[in-house]
Amino acid sequence: MSLNIVLLEPEIPQNTGNIARTCVVTDTTLHIIGPIKFSLEEKAVKRAGLDYWSSLKVYYYKNYQEFNQKHQDKNIFYATTKTHRLYSDVNYQSYEDLYIMFGKESKGIPEKILRESPENNITIPMMQIEKARSLNLSNACAVVIYEVLRQWNFPMMLKEDSDF
């Protein structure tokens, strides 16, 4: 089983660092689609990812077209606030190789991309508050990653010799 998180044009280095750290501890591959407005070498990215960055499986694509060309045959879900299908309603157990895309912090995934596979659009439910558009990107990634892993029974993550 292979879980992949895809960040489309991330804008905040600390979020990318936090997501990288979550990817390392969950054996998830990170795909970053540019252009991005910060360097992956920035201190903020490295600080948020701590010393995990060297253990990260990460791929970078200069734009969405490059990513799409290399992964057009993959099972990709799109996290968005523009759908009613809950992330927890998907049966992830039926997928061996799974990609979940998250859009940039300020705008999300463009509607053009969301229209390509509307049946694969998923959302995390939240209260409708005027000034709160969505969860923090790194929190949203963690929520969805752990739902997939829960359905996959946390492969290689649970310690059998633990009493707790």
Image (tube, rainbow, N blue to C red):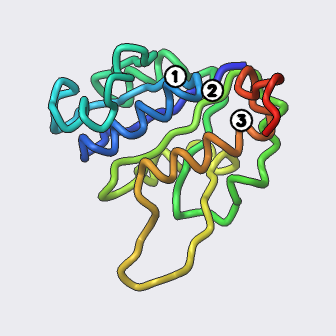
Secondary structure type for disc 2: strand
The three-letter code of the residue at mark 2 reads Leu
Look at mark 2 in the image and give the residue it sits on. 3
Q: Earlier in the sequence, mark 1 or mark 3?
A: 1
10 Å neighbourhood of mark 1: few (<14), some, or many (≥20)? Answer: some
**Point 31% across, 39% down: residue:** 9
Where residue 140 appears, x then y in whole percent?
A: 51, 52
The three-letter code of the residue at mark 3 reads Leu
Please tell me which residue lies in front, 133 or 138.
Answer: 138
The answer for how far apart the CA atoms under marks 2 and 1 are is 6 Å
Residues at circles 1 and 3 in contact by the CB criterion of under 8 Å: no
The disc placed on residue 29 is 1
Q: Tell which tag, 1 or 3, sits nearer the viewer.
A: 3
**Point 49% across, 15% down: residue:** 70
Quarter of the view holding residue 149:
top right
Look at mark 3 in the image and give the residue it sits on. 149
Q: Is residue 155 left or right of residue 7?
A: right
The three-letter code of the residue at mark 1 reads Thr
Quarter of the view holding residue 155:
top right
Quarter of the view holding residue 86:
bottom right
Please tell me which residue lies in front, 32 or 152.
Answer: 152
